[in-house]
Amino acid sequence: MLLVTCANGQVGHRIVPYLIDKGQDVRVMDLNPKVEDYKKIGAKEAIVGNGTDEKVLDKAMDGIDAVIYIPPLFTYQEAKMGKMAIDAAIKAGVKQFIDISVLFPGLDNNLQHRMKTKVERYLMYRGWESHMLWTVLQPGGYYHNLYVKPFYDKGELPSYSPLDQVISMVDARDEADVALKALADPEGYDKGVFTLAAEKYSIRQVAALMSDVTGKEIKPVFVPKDKLKDYWPDYFLGSDSYAEEAFWHVYDSNTRWDWDGNSKEINWLLDGKVRTLRSYFEEEAAKAGIPVHKKN
């Protein structure tokens, strides 16, 4: 059986149904009770609980063959939770641990990158000590963070990054496809650290592509610092202080550097069958009832 952690988050919502559809026997875990809803679409079991609770982790890992470890978002306990999950997996005799990290975790100006670096390092040492098989996936920005329907309705794509900053992106289902390859060949993917950077775009280019797909002009809009709270209130209004600080570090990084990687690795892993941002926009537009303008 496969355990997927933080299953109720955005990444989980993309990959858990996909993994179930591909025939995986999945146990899901999350702090949010809504994770139980996955049983309606075929998840075998759901564990509701906190990833800092050793008893919850022991229950989640019991009888598990492999783990896809999705980390929590913007929490000061991220490194602790990752280490606890690794220890619990080893204690339970889990054969394989797939860590979902981030593109360039060494970009230590970002707080969450520092956390993921600590988890990767811990997995390396504990994996060697215990002989648990492990793989690390390092995705770029996810396509699903680009919301076609609201951007289409409003006619603008807001960004706290400079409009010509370039970042690499990936479809979460391609990430799941790489994980499935690792699950099918644990020894072959053992101690592999794989960059998942499918395509690179600036926000200006993303808006132009979305406009081309939907047939409606969608303007890229750079949001100034004093207006950020209006667009991303969750990081500020009553939010955890660490989450706010992490947001400001990302903002600082994005105003200083690109965040793009090399696409050869993911194309090699998936035999060149990598989902494009255009195909994602076409899919999301069709779901929303927006006329899709196919590329000739």
Image (tube, rainbow, N blue to C red):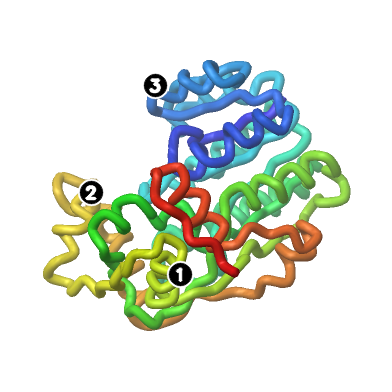
- Does residue 144 appear in this view? yes
Please report the residue visible at 55 percent of the width from the left and 26 percent of the height from the top. 28
In the picture of the structure, the residue carrying the numbered disc 2 is 234
For mark 2, does the 10 Å Cα neighbourhood hold few (<14), some (14 to 19), or many (20 or more) residues?
Answer: few
User: In this rendering, which labeled residue sits more in front, label 1 or label 2?
Assistant: 1
Instruction: Determine whether the residue tagged by mark 1 lies in a helix, strand or loop.
Output: helix
Could you tell me residue 99's position as x and y percent? 63, 48
Amino acid bearing label 3: Pro
x, y (%) of residue 285?
44, 51
Q: Which amino acid does label 2 sit on?
A: Asp
Picture layout, residue 287 above or below residue 208 = above
In this orientation, which residue lies closer to the viewer: 206 or 250?
206
Q: Residue 33 carries which label?
A: 3
Left or right side of 261 for 74 = left
Q: In this view, does 197 lie above or below 237?
A: below
* Disc 3/disc 1 C-alpha distance (Å): 37 Å
Type of amino acid at the residue the image marks with label 1: Leu
Task: Using the rendered image of the protein, determine whether residue 55 is visible from the camera's viewpoint.
Answer: no
Q: In the image, residue 213 lies at what x, y percent?
A: 46, 63
Disc 1: CA contacts within 10 A as few (<14), some (14-19) or many (>=20): some
User: SS for tag 2?
Assistant: helix
Q: In this view, does 294 lie above or below 181?
A: below
**Which mark is first along the chain, 2 or 3?**
3
Q: How crowded is mark 3: few (under 14 residues within 10 Å), some or many (20 or more)?
A: few
Residue position for label 1: 209
Q: Which residue is drawn at 49% across and 40% down?
A: 81
**Marks 1 and 2 close (CB-CB < 8 Å):** no
